[in-house]
Amino acid sequence: LVLSNSFSSLPSATMIQSLFIINNKGDVLIEKHWRGHLSRSICDFFWDKLSKMPSSQDLVPVISTPKLYLIYLRHNDLYFLSAVQQEISPLFVLEFMRRVADIFRDYFSVINDETIKSNFVTVYQLLDEMMDNGFPFTTEPNILKEMIPPPGVMRQFVEELTGSTGISNVLPDGSLSSTHWRKAGVKHSPNEIYFDIIEEMDTMIDSNGIMITGEISGQIQCNCKLSGMPDLTLTFNNPRIFEDHSFHPCVRLMLYEQQKIISFVPPDGQFELMKYRVTQQVQPPLYCKPQISFSDIGGKVLIMVGPKNVSSGRVIENVVISIPFPKAVSSINLTPNYGTVQYDEMSKVCRWNIGKLPKEKSPNLSGSVTFQPGATVPEGTPILLVDFKISQFSVSGLQVNSLTLHNEAYKPYKGVRNITKAGKFQVRSAPQ
């Protein structure tokens, strides 16, 4: 599957009627209508569906109603809910809402209740420019920033002094050209471009330490500060490991399909060059061996964690083990030989914060849990969630071979940084 790298080829019937932004309490923060007004009662219908689910992740992203289709995207503690009247590609709607969330994060740094409420005017200005009559219009952050300045002290001062909205009346340079994501006449000193290759491991490991499922979700973030109109060619050592991939509109898709070369004129500033997925089996960089057993009055816990040789000696940091205990647990008595333990009485989740994984010894967590009187003994054992981060390491083995600059005479500074993180990294526990 190759996702479309542009909204320009969408069929004429493709349109979004309304967009709602809802917080984790069910309150509607933002509502934007492009094709007629839609009652907020549709949000109550969505929230009622969500509330009936054991977990918010269990609700399917597309909900059918007698008159509408509801498509939602969760970002942090906010829900982006789109209403459409016709059958359209859900990926189109999800991609647009993801772009909206990315633009908000680019403008406000953090997306939550407070930032949405405090930047109420800017949010509506952005939505006005990003979609016209239900069709995506301007979704490039660099173009939007020229028309709508990011919030700040200077913008607030100018708006209060002049009474203006702060929106430019002039279209940005290059907005009507074939490279609308990059304005003309860009100048930087020094000229530099940097790439971050970020990979997340989604893995399920059974109680014997054998990987059941595993895939890698990767993205390449770029920070470009190049003058003029640079034309770049990026090559990898093993591009055929990509299963699925999607590109920024600046990438020449046909050339990549033919030669596996990424050729592009980059936007100015920070942007996401591509996303990809790798399904080949790779060994996780660490092991986690949980042994948990329950009896009538409680249970025993022993968890051991350590590095594997596949990480090429890199330091594994930000290691956190989350143990979701049954609701029957009344208290815990767990002692780590390394790191700290935090227990949330409400959610019954224990977080073992190891931090940087030591090489000289294997951290372990041991102790016991106590059940409430008369509680039923749980049938299964918990599934642990593991979080970690490794700098300068690519778990898929992806490496940049070369980056070539055309059209310009200068020699830029170039850099590549690899980061591997845990995505949904789950480990099943075994009874002692």
Image (tube, rainbow, N blue to C red):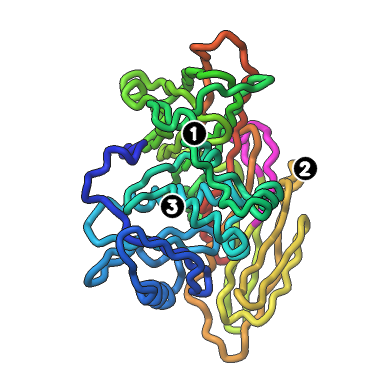
The image quadrant where one finds the C terminus is bottom right
Report helix, strand or loop for mark 1: loop
Can you give x and y, in whole percent of width and height, for residue 128 in the image?
43, 52
Q: Residue at x 59, y 72 (%)?
A: 325
Q: Can the viewer see residue 109? A: no
The residue that disc 1 covers is 172
Q: CA distance from mark 2 to mark 3?
A: 57 Å
Query: Above or below — where is 136 with respect to 171?
Result: below
Q: Nearer the viewer, mark 2 or mark 3?
A: 3
Tag 3: residue type?
Asp
The answer to the question of whether label 1 and label 3 lie on touching residues, with beta carbons closer than 8 A, is no
Q: Nearer the viewer, residue 123 or 389?
A: 123
Residue 128 — which label? 3
Can you give x and y, in whole percent of width and height, for residue 222 in the image?
55, 32
Q: Earlier in the sequence, mark 2 or mark 3?
A: 3
The image quadrant where one finds the N terminus is top left
Q: Is residue 322 magenta?
A: no
Query: Above or below — where is 68 with respect to 377?
Result: above
Tag 1: residue type?
Pro
Q: Residue at x 60, y 46 (%)?
A: 150
Left or right, residue 352 beside residue 248: right
Rendered image quadrant of residue 58: bottom left
Rendered image quadrant of residue 275: top left
Q: Is residue 317 magenta?
A: yes
Tag 2: residue type?
Glu
Q: Earlier in the sequence, mark 1 or mark 3?
A: 3
Residue 360 — which label? 2
Q: CA distance from mark 1 to mark 2?
A: 57 Å
Point out the stretch of residues depicted in magenta.
Answer: 307-320
Query: Above or below — where is 47 with respect to 361?
Result: below
